[in-house]
Amino acid sequence: MRFPLHITTDMVKWQLKNKLQGRDRYPVVLMLEPLYTCNLACVGCTPERHMGDLKDRLSLQECLQAVDEAGAPVVSICGGEPTIYPELPELVREVIDRKRHIYLCTNGILLERFYQKSTPHKRISINVHLDGLRDTHDFVCARPGVFDKAIEMIKEGKKLGYSVCTNTTVYRETEIREIEEMMQLLTGLGVDGMMISPGYHYEKLAENHFMYRQEIHQKFERVLELSKQYKVSLTPLFLEFAAGKRDYPCTPWGNVTRTPFGWKGPCYLIGDKYFKTWDEFWGGVDWNYWEKREDHRCHNCFMHSGFEASVVRKLPESPKDMLRMAKWMMSA
Ligand code: SF4
Ligand code: SF4
């Protein structure tokens, strides 16, 4: 199966529960960013995400409150670099106690620390950042040796019995041939899934490594093909969308983001406003506006955080798509 059965059943139960309660909008993933401190300063990362002081991190209590308020069955712990978060082992234990599934998103440099303090659990997936093979990844991370460390930690995680997946951003300069070689390597290491995201152009950046719509379509047409051979953790319907073969409205409320500055609105990518409380956030973002993708910053966006939930939301409108998704879920 593409996703472990317990994640799929938890997702389906959560959707049914919300439908029965008459809620049309509800989060499916909480992006939990407990700190904006990092041991890297990657090329594609916004300074606010890695230059924060450790003392400004969310407390364990604030993190758990966010987990309870969002209610989402999946919690993606990111940042910053979460292995720097001193309370990470307790946070992971508490989130598991709440019967949520965790994706721990990490650059791998300090992952050994986490392995020493934690034990594998079916509700934890280690998600290692890897933007290509050695030269490319070390360039993106602006530090030599990061690729080798990431590979070492992937192997170690698999040896210890963790579910391990990877997260790759495709930039303008990325050769899809290299992504295929990376997929071959990762398949050999036995990774459980590979997430491939388009880095897209949405505002003026000092260095423009991000893609416009047509460039994303071209590269993702090939990623769509590769997903038939490799364990890509993106639905075929989303990949068709990224390849320009179908269209979706956005579902920004599907992946909600809690940061050290507050709840980020409208989405994981755009922080127009940070809200102090969940109620202010949930009631304060104009979801109708953002769903329509009319904002200029949405034009080139094909992020799975905005659109995988749209795939699921629109499924009931097409029995053919439902069948394809069911087949895909069952595939290896
Ligand atoms: S590892 Fe992640 S948080 Fe740290 S600089 Fe790189 S992209 Fe940003
Ligand atoms: S289209 Fe992208 S940038 Fe716009 S609201 Fe959705 S996720 Fe955010």
Image (cartoon, rainbow, N blue to C red):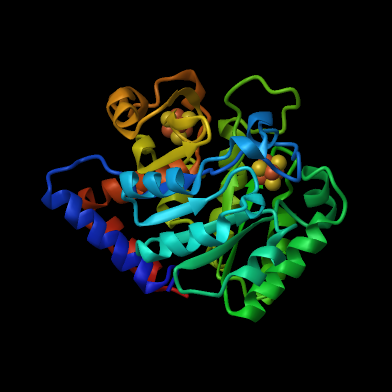
Q: Residue at x 34, y 66 (%)?
A: 8
Residue 233 visible within the image: no
Above or below, 208 against 39 in this view is above
Q: Residue at x 54, y 75 (%)?
A: 120
* Residue 309: % across, % down: 36, 47
**Horizontal placement of 73 versus 187: left or right?**
left
Q: Nearer the viewer, residue 320 or 7?
A: 7
Residue 200 figure quarter:
top right
Above or below, 149 against 158 in this view is above
Residue 213 figure quarter:
top right
Q: Which corner quadrant holds the N terminus? A: bottom left
**Horizontal placement of 27 versus 224: left or right?**
left
Quarter of the render that holds ligand 1? top right
Q: Nearer the viewer, residue 308 or 68?
A: 68
**Horizontal placement of 141 versus 103: left or right?**
right
Residue 96 figure quarter:
bottom left
Q: Residue at x 82, y 50 (%)?
A: 138
Q: Residue at x 21, y 48 (%)?
A: 317
* Residue 232: % across, % down: 54, 62
* Residue 48: % across, % down: 64, 30
Residue 296 visible within the image: yes
Above or below, 143 against 112 in this view is above
